[in-house]
Image (cartoon, rainbow, N blue to C red):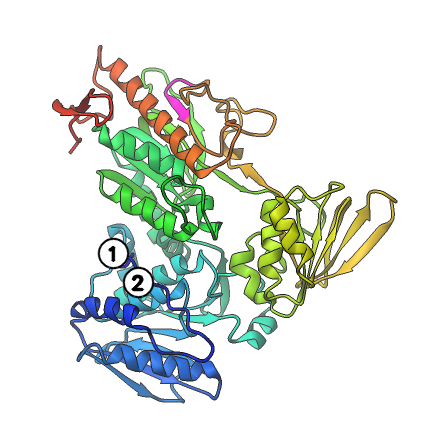
Amino acid sequence: MRLPGPFIAFNPKDDMAVLDAALISQLNQLMDRVTHPVELVMSLDDRPESAQISDMLEQVAALSANITVRRDDSAHDRRPAFSITRPGSDISITFAALPTGHEFNSFVLALLQVGGNPVKLDEKVVAGARAITTPKNFVTYISLTCQNCPTVVQAINAMAVLNPLITNTVVDGSLFRGEVEAEKIKATPTMYLNGELFGQGRMEAAQILSGMDSDAGASMAAELSSRKPYQVLVVGQGPAGVASAIYLARKGTRTALIGDRFGGQVNDTLSIENVISVPHTEGPKLASDLRTHASQYEIDMIDGVRASELLPTTDGDDLVRVRLEGDAQLSADAVVLATGAHWRQMGVPGEQEYRNKGVTYCPHCDGPLFKGKDVAVIGGGNSGIEAALDLAGVARHVTVVEFMPACKADEVLLDRVDQTTNITVLTNSAVTEVVGDGSQVTGLHYDDRATGEHRELALDGVFVQIGLMPNTDWLKGAVKLDAHGQIVIDDRGATNVPRVFAAGDCTDVPFKQIIVAEGAGAIAGLSAWESLIREQSTAAPKGSDAASTTGSQDARKGEPQAAMAR
């Protein structure tokens, strides 16, 4: 579902809607992929975004004889909006948005796919989408700064191209604020299917299809369970898991890389400046680069699945098995656990009740929904202070609530807070409850730890930024965990269970950094490969295709590298 090359994001100034020369040049290189007629149908009003949409579509249409544009203000219920249609068919994808930022790629990809460029999804998802026989009308609310929204938008759009019974209307929440407030939408993406709430947050294509059609989900689960054992199964698609899978594939090992969110927590990071040799990147781009790199190797990448149980070996069968949600099961000679971490929760009354109803964990994704509102950021570390500074640009007022007597963030960030007039910092304060009116957050209660006084704060949103927790609940009783729920590993990434290795933020390594996770993933992958090599002295691993060793050499150590398993 990725574009065929790097793309410049379209971020127009308020007074300029035209695409610049560099972006026009990039788009022009893709126009030979539009082999079917495409009509862009727009409905406009008197807002500035309407003029920008009109200018953008006219410029795009000028690049190909197969693309036309026309205005019909009665064509859409929302204005401004436009549809990408294929004349003579019922295929139609609608954007009630000026698709800039992260969503510009979604627009270009939809344009190419409606225009005949092949949809690239897992073949099981393609078959399942085409098998849908009843109308599935999605409305997907997004924000243009949301890193997770394009994954959902592009997946549904792709299925809409495969089957005209599936439609998708992408709605920018900041452009239709009244609608968002009426629906009490406090998180992006939020998806409605045939008028009913379908889901919130990042979902892969396979998960969306399973939610639409339980039979399709059961069919995909059965197919996964029927696969022969792998040599190594890597659970987790973040930096640690991808590094592990790449090193294993380079050793000629038959490897699967599974997960429910390619890139993991990387997707939630706006700016990354500490990956050595890469001075600056953004989380979604790094996640895309990880996939691109992994795609160069013979790795079975299974998206949209979540592990639910690590099964013990049985008598006469020493395969390691992993059960997936939905009753699928995969097996392998060895397993690498790289499931990463998730945002730590406050654990106070009201937090779960109002999650995605004002309680959120991603300021970049959901911040635009709180334009002109009063919000709180829980946590005074670097992530909390960075979130506060980010939110200060859209919210009316931001209150940082820090448990300790002083914020732990870097001084350079705290200096910026001191210079930002709409940020207040409350230290030595313990949140005791999130309160609301039953449908959305209206405030929070906290205790002043110095005086013992109980206080209330009226709010529209609460952004929790108090660190991470390992994704290891499903492993309790299966492998050794420390008091913090982290997987205990040795210096080679081995757990206390034979042929089960682990790497990254789910383990007890002291530093949770991308570059540390990648290095740990490489160690765990090489350790898993070495464990298989040792077993080969007596018998070939059960997941092996008996690949022969070639004369190719490792780039650094000159050791023989096994041929790629076919």
Please count the marks in the image. 2
Label 1–label 2 contact, CB within 8 A: yes
Q: Is residue 502 magenta?
A: no
Q: Main secondary structure of the magenta part?
A: loop
Residue at 33%, 38% in the rendered image = 257
Expressed as whole percent of the image width and height from the top left, the position of residue 532 reads 27, 19
- Mark 1 nearby-residue class (10 Å; few <14, some 14–19, many ≥20): few
Above or below, 105 against 40 in this view is: above
Q: Residue at x 67, y 59 (%)?
A: 419
Q: Nearer the viewer, residue 164 or 60?
A: 60
Q: Secondary structure at mark 2?
A: helix
Q: Which residue is mark 1?
A: 120
Image spot of residue 59 (x, y percent): 29, 79
For mark 1, give the secondary structure. loop
Residue 375, picture quadrant:
bottom right
Let me know if residue 500 is in the magenta part. Answer: yes
Q: Residues within 10 Å of mark 2 (few under 14, many from 20)?
A: many
Where 411 falls versus 555 (above or below)? below
In the image, is 550 to the left or to the right of 364? Answer: left
- Among numbered discs 1 and 2, the one appearing first in the sequence: 1
Q: Nearer the viewer, residue 447 or 113?
A: 447
* Picture coordinates of residue 487, whole percent (x, y): 50, 26
Q: Position of residue 31 (x, y in %)?
A: 19, 70
Asked if residue 152 lies left or right of residue 89, the reply is right
Say which mark, if any, is on residue 158: 2
Query: What stretch of residues is rendered in magenta?
Result: 497-501
> Image check: 230 left or right of 406?
left
